[in-house]
């Protein structure tokens, strides 16, 4: 019996070692691109807004613009530099290596709601790959996800890692472009055969590496998994308190190294940020859970965005992704309703500058409508031409949400 148990134990360890060796063998060699948060071998690199990049950035062919206002904690490798030239070779090598890996699981082009285990997962069709919700990667091991088409993620979509999965062990090969939707959250190293576009507020923990194609940023946060942050942020939340017209900001950290303190900033458009307040750290290094609170006594009406900036003792800063909060005095709606004789009315909404408004007639046809001004945070609209009496529909799309309003013309 004892010998039998020893044999079983030996087989277990041999199996474990074999699986571990197989898993590690899947890891592509990134070469010098290991230290890059974003790099393209052939394409322009542009940024709009105050993007925060933790890691190196660069391009080997094409202009690199937008830094500042973008902030880089790392090196900027310009076209033609020896570092950019070598990185261009290394990213192609890594991409080609992933092409040689054997598929273990076939997945559909719609990644929404799927849960993947370690190994090689393939979307082999030319159908556009999409993610309009959550993709879960579960388990400790190497994930290689090969997509035979471009990848587009929807607003606020995200990749969630559970049961020991790590962003440093996740590798996407995309035969096409990567477009990350507004406020979406991605994790892993993305090697693409096309452009990389991060829309407003999208975040990436990992790397974006392209063998050919432009890189376009817009107020994003990208953190290279090879460059650990001085502070591990467990949570960050902003909650509106309508009764007092204030916003409560709370965050928790689990690890702090050489931390000087925190600054909370607020924005109306994710482009320009102003300081709400700051908290100085009394103990620069900590391994315990620590909770912080701050109250914004003068928040914006409507939608605001809050973000946390951490400052090292040496002056370096790390900016974490922003969160949104809504504080309103009035309910959404149209007024006056019925609309007065000149066809002009106001629409209460959160983001009058960027909201998409459509006007439909009694026969469901799309009708023209004019945006005339913004008054007290409300959007002033005017119908075009003489309209017959009846009930019309106004649709509003903002922050990824759609609402409908009934509009009466007498």
Image (tube, rainbow, N blue to C red):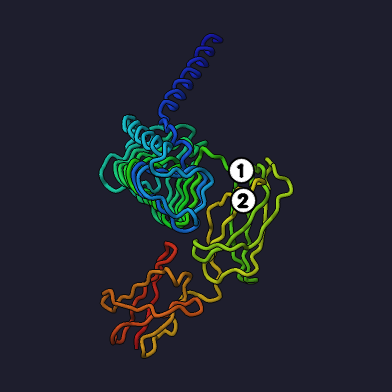
Mark 2 → mark 1, Cα distance in angstroms: 9 Å
81 above or below 184?
A: above
Asked where in the image residue 293 lies, by quadrant, the reply is bottom right
Relative horizontal placement of residue 22, taking residue 235 as reference (left or right): left
Q: Quadrant of the N terminus?
A: top right
Give coordinates of residue 308: x percent, y percent.
Answer: 59, 55
Q: Quadrant of the C terminus?
A: bottom left
Q: Is residue 352 visible in the rendered structure shown here?
A: yes
Q: Are marks 2 and 1 in contact (CB under 8 Å)?
A: yes
Q: Which residue corresponds to the image point at 34% horizontal and 44% vertical from the top-left? A: 42
Give the total number of marks visible in the rendering: 2
233 above or below 90?
A: below
Give coordinates of residue 174: x percent, y percent.
Answer: 34, 42
Furthest residue in direction bottom, as rendered: 341
Disc number placed over residue 310 in the picture, else none? 2
Q: Which residue is mark 1?
A: 230
Asked where in the image residue 114 lies, by quadrant, the reply is top left
Secondary structure beneath disc 1?
A: loop
The tag earlier along the polypeptide, 2 or 1, is 1
Mark 1 neighbour class, 10 Å CA radius: few under 14, some 14 to 19, many 20 or more? some
Q: Nearer the viewer, residue 130 or 313?
A: 313
Give coordinates of residue 397: x percent, y percent.
Answer: 40, 67
Q: Which residue corresponds to the image point at 74% horizontal and 49% vertical from the top-left? A: 282
Give coordinates of residue 63: x percent, y percent.
Answer: 38, 50
Relative horizontal placement of residue 345, taking residue 275 as reference (left or right): left
Mark 2 neighbour class, 10 Å CA radius: few under 14, some 14 to 19, many 20 or more? many
């Amino acid at each position: 019996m004892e010998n039998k148990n020893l044999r079983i134990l030996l087989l277990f360890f041999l199996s474990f070692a074999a699986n571990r060796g197989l898993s590690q063998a899947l890891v592509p060699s990134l070469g010098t691109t290991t230290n890059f948060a974003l790099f393209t071998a052939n394409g322009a690199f542009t940024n709009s807004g105050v993007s925060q990049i933790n890691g190196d950035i660069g391009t080997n062919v094409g202009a690199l613009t937008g830094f500042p206002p973008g902030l880089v904690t790392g090196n900027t490798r310009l076209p033609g530099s020896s570092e950019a030239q070598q990185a261009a070779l290394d990213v192609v090598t890594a991409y080609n290596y992933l092409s040689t890996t054997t598929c273990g699981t076939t997945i559909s082009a719609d990644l929404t709601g799927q849960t993947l285990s370690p190994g090689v997962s393939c979307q082999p069709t030319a159908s556009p790959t999409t993610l309009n919700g959550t993709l879960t990667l579960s388990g400790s091991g190497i994930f290689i996800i090969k997509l035979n088409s471009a990848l587009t993620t929807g607003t606020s979509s995200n990749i969630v890692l559970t049961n020991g999965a790590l962003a440093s062990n996740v590798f996407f090969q995309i035969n096409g472009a990567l477009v990350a939707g507004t406020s979406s959250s991605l994790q892993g190293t993305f090697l693409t055969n096309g452009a990389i576009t991060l829309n407003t507020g999208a975040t990436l923990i990992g790397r974006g590496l392209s063998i050919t194609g432009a890189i376009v940023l817009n107020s994003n946060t990208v953190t290279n998994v090879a460059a650990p942050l001085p502070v591990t942020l467990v949570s960050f939340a902003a909650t509106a308190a309508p009764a007092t017209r204030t916003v409560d900001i709370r965050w928790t950290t689990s690890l702090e190294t050489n931390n000087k303190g925190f600054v909370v900033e607020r924005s109306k458009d994710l482009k320009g940020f102003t300081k709400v307040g700051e908290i100085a750290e009394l103990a620069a290094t900590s391994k315990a859970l620590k909770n912080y609170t701050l109250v914004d006594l003068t928040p914006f009406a409507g939608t605001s965005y809050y973000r946390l900036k951490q400052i090292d003792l040496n002056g370096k800063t790390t900016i974490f992704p922003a969160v949104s909060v809504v504080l309103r005095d009035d309910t959404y709606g149209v007024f006056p309703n019925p609309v007065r004789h000149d066809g002009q009315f106001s629409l209460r909404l959160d983001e009058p500058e960027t909201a998409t408004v459509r006007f439909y007639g009694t026969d469901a046809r799309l009708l023209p409508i004019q945006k005339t001004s913004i008054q007290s945070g409300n959007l002033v609209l005017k119908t075009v031409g003489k309209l017959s009496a009846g009930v019309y529909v106004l649709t509003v799309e903002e922050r990824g949400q759609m609402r409908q309003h009934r509009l009466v013309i007498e």
